[in-house]
Every structure is written in C-alpha cells, then in structure tokens.
Image: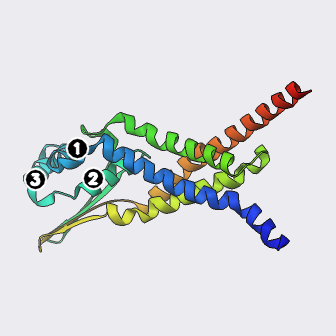
Amino acid sequence: MDDARTLARDWWPTAAGVVAGALAFGAVVAATAVRQRDEAGDVAAFVDSLAASFGPDAGRVLAELADWLEPDPTQVVAWFAYASHRVPLELDAEAFGNTAHRTVDVQSLSVWDGALAYAPPVALFAAGAAVVVLASVRRPSRAWQPGLGVAAGYVATALLALRVAGYERSLGVAELTIAPDPVTVALHTAAYALVFGLGGAVVVALARVQLAGRSDVRDE
C-alpha cells in the first residue's frame, strides 16, 4: 500500500502535466477557431490568399481552381493553429506526371491574424503554472516533472491533430495534398512546450518558494 501511494505521489505531477498539455493545445485550437472564425468560414478567401503567395503564374491557376480546392473549415483552423507555432504548410502537387513541392508560411498570408502567435505561449505558461499549483510542487528542482509532462501531452496532442489537418484532392490526372510536416510539428511544438510550459512550471514553483519564505518571516 505504501509503495502504491509513493508511486502515485511520484507520478501524479507528470500525469497531471500530460493532461494539462493536451488541454493547452486544445485551448490554442479553440482560441484560433474563435479568432479566425470569419477566415475559416470563408475558405475561398483563404485559398485566394494562398494562391497569391504562389506568384502571378501558378497563383492564377490555383485561384481558378478555388472552388475545387476549397478545404474544410476545420482544416483551415488547424492550419492556423499550427502556424501559430511557426509551422508552415507543405504543398505537393502532381499533374500529368509532373510533380511540384511548395512550402507556405501561413503567417505571411493576408488572412493571418498576428494575435494568434501569443496563443501557444499563454496557454502553455498557464498549463505549467496550473499543474505546479494543483500537484503541490513546492521545490523548483521538482518543477521539471510536471513541466515535461505538459510538453509530452502538448506534442502528442499536436501530432494526433494532424489527422484533421491533412488535405487531399484528386482529379484523376491531377492531385494536390496540403498538410504540415509531422517532424516540423513535433520539433516546433516541443520547443514551445519546453520553453513556455516548463518555464511556467519553474517560474511558479520559484514564486511559491518566495511566498512561503515571506510567510515564514511574518510568522516569526
């Protein structure tokens, strides 16, 4: 029984961090859906903006195919959410045996809302801070445990959400796929989660130590 309690006590901060990380990514997607609801609803405008980034020649062809290419609004929201982590879209096209690849920075498109760049840092910092408080982590040296849990949950959820972000259209002789690169998603979301999620956990753990020290001084 004691061993079970010790195990639960040791792993509780990590497990709570994983859940908090998953919720943090969900919060980023939710904030993106609210902030970009007009752009996600008007997918034709998104395709037009995407086409403009290709230049006058290829962009004109893409714009003419806008009705055929229209992605689902859920996919557009996912693309914006990944873009808030500086993850570009990878476009692969094939027509009549010819292939082409293009990387598109969504943040450079006219429909991009710069405020979305703040969503991941805020959500991750809040997640790291919340887990430290809920798990009663009182030493900064132990803050890495919930912090890494937040990072793991965040990255895992971001990778799972790629199933929604994948886009593919085929017209027999032509095919187009659009999706973020999984490796880039893993690296970028991990970097954000470690800096802001783990950072939030450490900052709040340090603050709790400071507050506890001041409380002890007042009690004396």
217 on left or right of 93 = right
Check disc 3 and give the amino acid type. Val
Q: Name the residue under label 3.
A: 61
Separation of marks 1 and 2 at Cα, in angstroms: 8 Å
- Please identify the quarter of the rendering in which residue 205 is found: top right
Mark positioned earlier in the residue sequence (3 or 2): 3
Q: Which residue is drawn at 32% across and 47% down?
A: 33
Image quarter of residue 18: bottom right
Q: For the point 12% across and 70% down, which residue is it?
A: 171
- Which one is in front, 192 or 60? 192
Report x, y in % for residue 126: 56, 42
User: Left or right of 150: which side holds 217?
Assistant: right
Asked whether the residues under the numbered discs 1 and 2 touch, taking CB atoms below 8 Å apart as contact, a structural biologist would say yes
- Is residue 145 visible to the viewer in this orientation of the structure? yes
Q: Is residue 67 above or below residue 124?
A: below
Front of the two marks 3 and 2: 2
Q: Is residue 183 visible?
A: no
The answer to which of 52 and 161 lies nearer the viewer is: 161
What distance separates the C-alpha of mark 1 from that of mark 3? 21 Å
Circle 2 Cα neighbour tier, 10 Å, few/some/many (<14 / 14–19 / ≥20): many
Do the numbered discs 3 and 2 sit on residues whose CB atoms are within 8 Å? no
Q: Residue furthest front?
A: 219
Q: Quadrant of the C terminus?
A: top right
Task: Say whether disc 1 or disc 2 marks the residue closer to the N-terminus.
Answer: 1
Determine the image quadrant of residue 98: bottom left
The disc label shown at residue 76, or none: 2
Residue 184, position as x, y percentages in the image: 45, 56
| Of residues 163 and 90, the one drawn nearer to the viewer in this rendering | 163
The residue that label 1 is drawn on is: 39
The local secondary structure at tag 3 comes to helix
Amino acid at circle 1 = Glu
In space, the residues marked 3 and 2 are separated at their CA atoms by 20 Å
